[in-house]
Amino acid sequence: MKANPKDVFSGTYYIDGDVACAYGAAAAGCKFLAGYPITPSTEAAEAFAKLAPQIGAMFIQMEDELGSIVAVLGASWAGKKSMTITSGPGFSLMMEGIGFGAALETPFVIINIQRGGPSTGVPTRTGQADMMQARWGSHGDYEIIALSPDSPQESFEFTIKAFNLAERYRVPVMLMSDECVGHMTEKVVIPSASEIEVEPRRFYHGPKDQYLPFKPERDLVPPMVKAGEGYRLHLTGLVHDENGYPLLDCDIDEVTQKSTTRRLVDKIRANADKIIEIKEDSLDDAEVVVVSYGITSRVALKGIEQAREYGIKVGSLRLVTVWPFPEKRITELAHKIKGFVVPEINYGQIVFEVERCSHGKANVVLVPHGGAGVHNPDDIFEAIKQVAKNKEKYEGVVEYRTSLERLIFG
Amino acid sequence: MNQNSVIVSLANALERTGLEKVCVVSDVLYKKGIADYLGVDLFHTTRGRTNCSYGGFGYNRGESFHARCAQKKLKNAPSVNSVFPLYICPEQPFNIPHLAKSCGAVYVARWTALHKAELTNSIAEALQKQGFSVIEAISPGEGNFAGVDGVASDAREKLLKFYYDNSEIKDTEPTENLAIDSDKKIIVGKFVDWERPTFIDLYNNQLRHTLGNKFVPYE
Amino acid sequence: MGKKTIGIRFAGFGGQGIIRSGIIVGRAVSIYDNKFATMNQSFGPEARGGACSSELVISDSKVLYPYVTVSDVLVVMSQEGYDKFEPELSEEGMLLIDEDLVKPKPPRGKIKIFSIPATKLAEELGNRIVANVVMLGFFTSLTKVVSVEAMRKAIPESVPSRFVELNLKAFDCGYEYSRKQKC
């Protein structure tokens, strides 16, 4: 389905990544945003608040992030495409609601403009350290989808993608942007509505009395209805069956058999090939492959350019969808190459996924960054050089000490 | 089926009003069949977070703060007055109607499990009002006191007797005097009932005024 | 300037339109000159108080590293901004200053200093808030990193409509000032 022309503000803009997210959400058909202001994501919420009354949407500032995420869930069940926008501290508060949303198979989008550091961290500077939290930050078994943009243009495009995936798989989708991308101003081209593909909600069309809110159809995903239309929905965060009824009085076997939990995981894992999007460059004869995402993938290209000039055969694998992780592709590459270089603005998160999928066939070197800034491309170049020249086999992930860290910590 | 008097009152009130699009958001109601029994959509939320926005309706800050706060404190209220406290409750008495009023509720009432007819009536009235209403229902906790039969029914009777002896209907009482304390009577009644534009009305009116033709209302 | 990637820093104090300067040039370069321009600005406590800056990376291809670590052009409109960012300026860079607000040290290396009484000229035009745009005219003429046509298109989109005329006048004033100086 094409986007509604009324929701698309076509044109060429010079805006930051945060604002681009708001235009993307509008174009995707988002009609409800509940959030609480938090640096460095506030510009996105503010921009959507400005667009909202022009497209029949609502922005509501809630009392905090606990309230925001639940309001988003409610709006989604009322039939609206909905989202929230936040940064680390708010993201932590939202974990409870994200788990609830995943358990109820509620489509919505969470935009996390990551800041540096744990706890309050560095609000006005960048980081990529919420990546593991995005995957399993809430308790219990579930899977989500996460995307990571590297520019304002991608912030616009990936926000639309996030909404589309949320609707297609009835799952919370996270747009894991960061302060650098969020606050970076660049040219953004918003095409006409006829060039934007949006996924409509998968509504149920059968007889009313036969509707089961958690009975899967295509791709293991159940169709949805709106609350208030007489379906007598019973929605609970308790482990439930296809009716939505809690499995409280059942014996263990019956719980396992009737529970929807297995499918929460399977619907993402079984469809992983369809969901996963990666951007590959020069992998055919690569000896070293740089695996990166978000802003780091962009900075890494500079290190890669330097390495190529130096004469190293280095390729790039960029994670557009970070979750689900492209396990098969990493394993395939691990058999062919000397090693992976994984730069990320944290002290090691995605690198351990790369290591796991390498099955000991290739060396894995982490180029860490403590946040509040992006990598120095020279460090990525040096790490590539180290992997290319090295003849020994590493055990586990080896951390590349950046020039700055060597300076500080020796 | 749940014997809780609040649920029975809610069911009766729903029947009386004949409302069709009703959603119940609760962190205690989750048993199979409740939605069908009441003829509603049911959201059983986590940890008392009842501030779902439903039917395109959202609460504003104060209101949802209230909803959360009241929700949590309601569960504590019976223990303040319980005739069978394990120990003395060390918390300060909490005043839900006063909080509700200051948050801007259009309808505020308080009843005990003894006042079934009044409670039903209040729920029916509140459901038909525009905006948010708060009704504090002081009732025995289901698990301990309001069990269907056996030992618990004796306790339940004693509690209802306690309500009979210790409550007083006083609609005109200013809400600041309504805190529940163990050495005072529980004042019950309908304390607030007025009209006020809803959040959605204000939103739509204000933005129509500001944006003119460019405004597309939220529906 | 023959380099592939150029780093530009605008610095001054809050209210001088320092961030807007970055946006105007960035917009002109990326939308009307069809090159790439990434703009970043100072945030947080440093953006609220005295010092305020924006940085712009211009390139013929996609900008990979979004920040300015060594600037090729430094445009400063406050002494504090000069003190803070002068060390970052390349030894072959250009330094553009509002001569009434900045007293520079003797230049390092091959740094070239260009002065303009931007704020005074803006006051003569009737409003000192356009001092930054006088400076942009001066900047455009000297650096040639952006075309005059692109700037004249980007300015009206970046300022309130009632100030468009004044801003264009301010731009021309700064542009002409540099040409007169050269003669």
Image: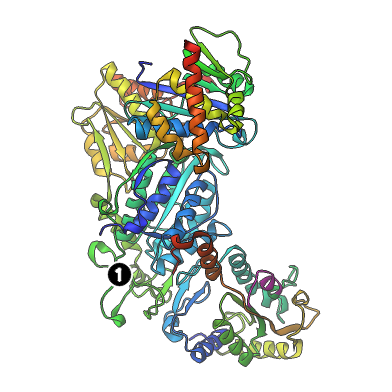
Image spot of residue B183 (x, y percent) = 81, 79
Name the residue located 80 percent from the left edge and 80 percent from the top edge: B184
Residue toward you, A289 or A140: A289
In the displayed structure, would residue B114 be above or below residue A156? Answer: below
Closest to the observer, B170 or A315? B170
Give yes or no for residue A215 being in the magenta stretch: no
Q: Name the residue under label 1.
A: A203
Whether residue B191 is visible to the viewer of this picture, yes or no, is: yes
Residue A326 locus on image (x, y percent): 28, 44
Q: How crowded is mark 1: few (under 14 residues within 10 Å), some or many (20 or more)?
A: few
Apparent side of residue B134 relative to residue B183 in the rendered image (left or right)? left
Region in magenta: B98-106
Under tag 1, what secondary structure?
loop
Residue A166 is at least partly visible in this image: no
- Residue at (68% x, 75% y) in the render: B77
Question: What colour scheme has been applied to the protein in the rendered image?
Answer: rainbow
Query: Outermost residue toward the left?
Result: A284
Q: How many marks?
A: 1
Tell me residue A345's x, y (percent).
Answer: 44, 35
Question: In the rendered image of this protein, does residue A307 appear above or below residue A294?
Answer: above
In this rendered view, identify the residue nearer to me: A28 or A253. A28
